[in-house]
Image: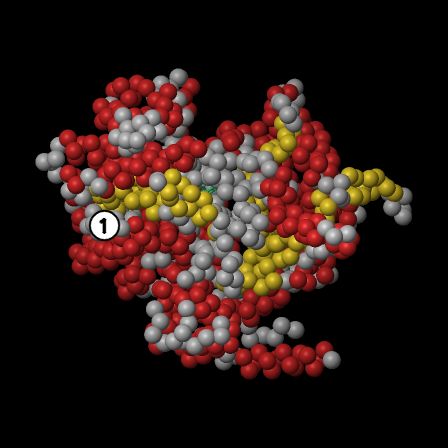
């Protein structure tokens, strides 16, 4: 029978070689087939959604066999080492265009669509993106999976299949409105549901010590609730290789979706109650970026996906004949920030309670399994869970955490005898008031590698945030400066520039971004400079047109596009930008006869729904835009646009069109930033602080091609310590004073004069993020930018050099460093001509 099936499979694959081929005809046929048989329509009657779905299925067909081979032949095989990435968020972005690029079939697909009278761009526009992330942290998770696939390293990303992703943002009277993101409403063609790999997850209840057959003590966890995790596999193809890795996202379901007991007594709602409450766990992504929300449901989400992931790994390792004591040889598990840290006690539980491994040996395996990436410098982002809450949801894990802590603190005392204060800060339990479990401490104690995401941040972790851990475990600490995927963030989103690059330096840079270096000499070539300018102009036209269609605001593509897009947060200082715009506006009004650089200021970004100050900043930007855009006395010299619902799809139009990239966080607050990289690689110049990866970008592109301003991290610290008084800057800087006065006098809120008082009062009397202190130097840097802008060839040259020198920031480089220093996994070439058996 086995042989018979083998033969059938073999014949099937042979027959389907053509069907899943990458030729024009195969793609056209596949597409028309799907349109008819799957969507039930004809080409001349198909809607945009029909066309999108049909093309998506056609492309997906080309991934299945590659995925199956990667999964079965490389990942599941006992002797290959597999990288496991645990992340609560993945910012995948729209999939169709990306998968077409990675399969290397952009031109063929474009032609296939053209032949059928269809514009590929409009098909791409019909996709609803999976918004399963808040921002940068999810972006790196997605980029690293892309990098692992492109480098042909077997990997699985594990996460949550949130039914509703990050909320959609719209504006009403200038205020942010949040709406549910129903990204699944038309179905998601890029996933395969895997019923047979479902696992069960327990919550609550109590523990019990029992003796096993050989008389050893053993702990039983008797839960009060059990649910099911159902995996959905999303394909992650590498660039022009056969490797297609897996992003396995879990959905929560009730084990018994219908309670007949309740139903029989006439309680219909009661009958489905369990189902509803179980499924709530993966309903929605918490929309807070870098601030913790100590909600029970959030902890349940974290434990849910982490337990699903580890059970899955243990299952297929044991299925393939692995010895549990070698678990850490087969898998290396990277924790993307502290959100998945409960994986550490969970692996201990599985090893000790379920697999009967002795504690010390289990701890050895656990510590050899996990690497921890730390992504933040904000103290309020360091996760902690109340001991009471954690013990209630995960009683067994709380015991394990106490046991880990006991041993860990004994070790710490050897390093710091008689330093009770240090021991208290190292403890996994914060006992200063209500007791909390400190997840970062747990992550540091339980993993063999701890890395920051840019040089400055890693240094700050070593000297402040994780200082005492650094002195106990210096060998664990390392830096991995973030990177971005060049396929998505240059090739896919900037086809025009890609063409110019290919025509000038040939292809090859997409896989080896350092090759962009060979562009440098062209910065001196007038003909090339002209082409560069022409391409930029076309891209800016595209964005201008989109802005007009969406918001009815006319922006001049010849003006400087000055762009600030990212989450709205006080430390990112969107309000510093607003103060600059207001002061410029004031200046133009006061001196209308001077000459000015025409500028378009573009904003984008969401505020956490509960973050009042951030929402007030949005309202301020929209109010300032309203006044400036309707003031005919300034001759359209400046325009302000806030693009609603900033997400990957919108951002793909925005990054390539930027002249000036705003990276203006308070120094010492932005761990890295990745938007800064996306802008620069697309040829924008940066105005930025000495913070995060800005520092390394400036180092690479050269200080002449970067407008640096502001206090450095140590200056911020010492100014704070010496007693910072923001009010003096208000008194001393006239244009700053005028800008703040305009806000306070109701210039932008005529019906509600005091509307922005909470914001201006904060700036004048507190100003945690030193907006006031940095204002003067920021304006100076902006003037420097305007001077360069006035020499358009010199600007273009600097723009070329930005692109040419960004090789370092390819996520392939970052992934290679992770592989070399932490993951130690090898590439496995996937040959899809082999049979699977
Ligand atoms: C972040 C940091 O704030 C950001 O600077 C960094 O680039 C990314 C990726 O490392 O991680 N940390 C975090 O919690 N979010 C980030 O964007 N949301």
The answer to whether residue 105 is visible is no
Q: Secondary structure at mark 1?
A: loop
Confirm or reject: label 1 Cβ below 8 Å from ligand 1.
no
Q: Which residue is mark 1?
A: 554
Q: Position of residue 195 (x, y in %)?
A: 66, 62
Q: Is residue 473 above or below residue 257?
A: above
Q: Residue at x 51, y 73 (%)?
A: 38
Q: Residue at x 68, y 32 (%)?
A: 388
Is the C terminus in the top left, top right, bottom left or bottom right quadrant?
bottom right
Q: Position of residue 563 (x, y in %)?
A: 31, 44
Q: Residue at x 90, y 43 (%)?
A: 215
Question: For this rendering, which residue is in front, 669 or 357?
Answer: 669
Is the N terminus in the top left, top right, bottom left or bottom right quadrant?
bottom right
Query: Are there few (<14), some (14-19), or many (20+) residues within 10 Å of tag 1?
Result: some
The answer to whether residue 166 is visible is yes
What's the image's color scheme? secondary structure
Q: Residue at x 36, y 23 (%)?
A: 761
Q: Position of residue 20 (x, y in %)?
A: 50, 76
Q: Position of residue 435 (x, y in %)?
A: 65, 27
Considering every residue shown, the one lying at the far top of the view is 723
Q: How many marks?
A: 1
Considering every residue shown, the one lying at the far left of the view is 593
Q: Quadrant of residue 191?
A: bottom right
Considering every residue shown, the one lying at the far front of the view is 266
Q: Is residue 401 above or below residue 794?
A: above
């Amino acid at each position: 029978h086995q042989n018979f099936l083998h033969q059938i499979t073999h014949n099937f694959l042979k027959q389907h070689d053509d069907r899943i081929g990458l030729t024009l005809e195969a793609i056209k046929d596949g597409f028309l087939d799907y349109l008819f048989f799957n969507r039930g329509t004809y080409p001349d009657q198909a809607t945009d959604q029909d066309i999108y779905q049909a093309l998506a299925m056609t492309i997906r067909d080309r991934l299945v066999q590659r995925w199956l081979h990667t999964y079965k032949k490389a990942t599941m095989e006992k002797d290959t080492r597999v990288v496991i990435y645990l992340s609560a968020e993945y910012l995948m972005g729209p999939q169709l265009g990306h998968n077409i690029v990675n399969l290397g079939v952009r031109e063929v697909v474009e032609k296939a669509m053209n032949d059928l009278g269809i514009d590929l761009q409009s098909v791409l526009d019909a996709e609803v993106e999976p918004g399963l992330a808040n921002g940068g942290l999810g972006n790196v998770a997605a980029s690293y999976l892309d990098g692992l696939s492109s480098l042909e390293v077997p990997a699985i990303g594990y996460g949550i299949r949130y039914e509703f992703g990050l909320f959609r943002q719209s504006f009403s009277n200038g205020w942010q409105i949040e709406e549910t993101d129903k990204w699944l409403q038309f179905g998601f063609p890029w996933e395969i549901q895997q019923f047979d790999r479902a696992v069960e997850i327990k919550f609550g209840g109590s523990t019990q010590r029992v003796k096993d057959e050989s008389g050893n003590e053993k702990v039983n966890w008797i839960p009060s609730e059990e649910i099911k995790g159902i995996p959905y596999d999303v394909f992650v193809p590498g660039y022009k290789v056969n490797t297609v890795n897996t992003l396995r996202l879990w959905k929560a379901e009730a084990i018994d979706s219908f309670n007949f007991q309740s139903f029989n007594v006439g309680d219909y709602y009661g009958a489905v109650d369990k189902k509803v409450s179980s499924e709530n766990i993966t309903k929605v992504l918490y929309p807070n970026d870098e601030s913790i929300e100590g909600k029970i449901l959030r902890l349940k989400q974290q434990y849910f996906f982490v337990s699903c992931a580890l059970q899955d790994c243990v299952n297929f390792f044991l299925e393939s004949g692995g010895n549990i004591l070698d678990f850490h040889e087969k898998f290396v598990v990277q924790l993307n920030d502290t959100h998945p840290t409960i994986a550490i006690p969970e692996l201990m539980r599985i090893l000790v309670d379920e697999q009967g491994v002795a504690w010390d040996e289990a701890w050895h395996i656990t510590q050899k399994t996990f690497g921890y990436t730390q992504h933040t410098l904000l103290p309020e982002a360091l996760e902690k869970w109340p001991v009471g809450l954690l013990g209630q949801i995960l009683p067994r894990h709380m015991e394990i955490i106490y046991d880990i802590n006991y041993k860990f603190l004994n070790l710490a005392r050897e390093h710091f005898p008689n330093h009770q204060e240090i021991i208290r800060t190292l403890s996994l339990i914060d006992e200063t008031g209500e007791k909390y479990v400190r997840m970062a401490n747990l992550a540091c104690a339980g993993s063999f590698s701890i890395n920051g995401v840019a040089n400055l941040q890693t240094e700050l972790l070593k000297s402040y945030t994780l200082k005492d851990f650094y002195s106990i475990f210096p060998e664990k600490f390392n830096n991995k400066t973030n990177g971005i995927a060049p396929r998505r963030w240059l090739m896919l989103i900037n086809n025009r520039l890609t063409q110019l690059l290919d025509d000038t330096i040939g292809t090859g840079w997409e896989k080896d971004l350092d090759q962009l270096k060979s562009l440098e000499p062209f910065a001196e070539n007038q003909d090339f400079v002209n082409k560069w300018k022409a391409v930029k102009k076309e891209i800016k036209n595209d964005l201008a047109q989109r802005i007009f269609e969406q918001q009815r605001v006319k922006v001049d593509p010849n003006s400087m596009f000055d762009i600030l897009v990212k989450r709205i947060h006080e430390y990112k200082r969107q309000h510093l930008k607003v103060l600059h715009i207001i002061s410029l506006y004031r200046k133009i009004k006061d001196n209308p006869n001077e000459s000015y650089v025409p500028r378009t200021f573009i904003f984008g970004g969401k505020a956490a729904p509960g973050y009042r100050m951030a929402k007030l900043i949005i309202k301020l930007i929209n109010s300032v835009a309203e006044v400036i855009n309707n003031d005919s006395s300034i001759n359209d010299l400046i325009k302000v646009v806030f693009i609603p619902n900033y997400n990957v799809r919108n951002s793909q139009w925005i990054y390539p069109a930027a002249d000036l990239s705003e990276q203006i966080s308070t120094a010492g607050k932005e761990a890295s930033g990745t938007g800064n990289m996306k802008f620069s690689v697309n040829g924008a110049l940066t105005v930025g602080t000495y913070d995060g990866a800005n520092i390394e970008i400036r180092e690479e592109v050269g200080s002449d091609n970067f407008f640096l301003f502001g206090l450095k991290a140590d200056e911020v610290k010492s100014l704070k310590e010496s007693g910072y008084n923001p009010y003096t800057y208000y008194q001393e800087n006239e244009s700053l004073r005028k800008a703040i006065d305009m806000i306070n006098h109701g210039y932008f809120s005529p019906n509600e004069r005091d509307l922005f008082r909470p914001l201006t009062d904060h700036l004048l009397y507190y100003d945690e993020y030193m907006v006031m202190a940095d204002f003067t130097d920021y304006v100076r840097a902006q003037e420097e930018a305007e001077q360069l802008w006035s020499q358009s060839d010199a600007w273009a040259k600097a723009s070329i050099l930005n692109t040419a020198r960004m090789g370092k920031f390819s996520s392939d480089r970052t992934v290679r460093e992770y592989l070399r220093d932490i993951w130690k996994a090898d590439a496995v070439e996937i040959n899809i001509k082999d049979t699977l058996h």
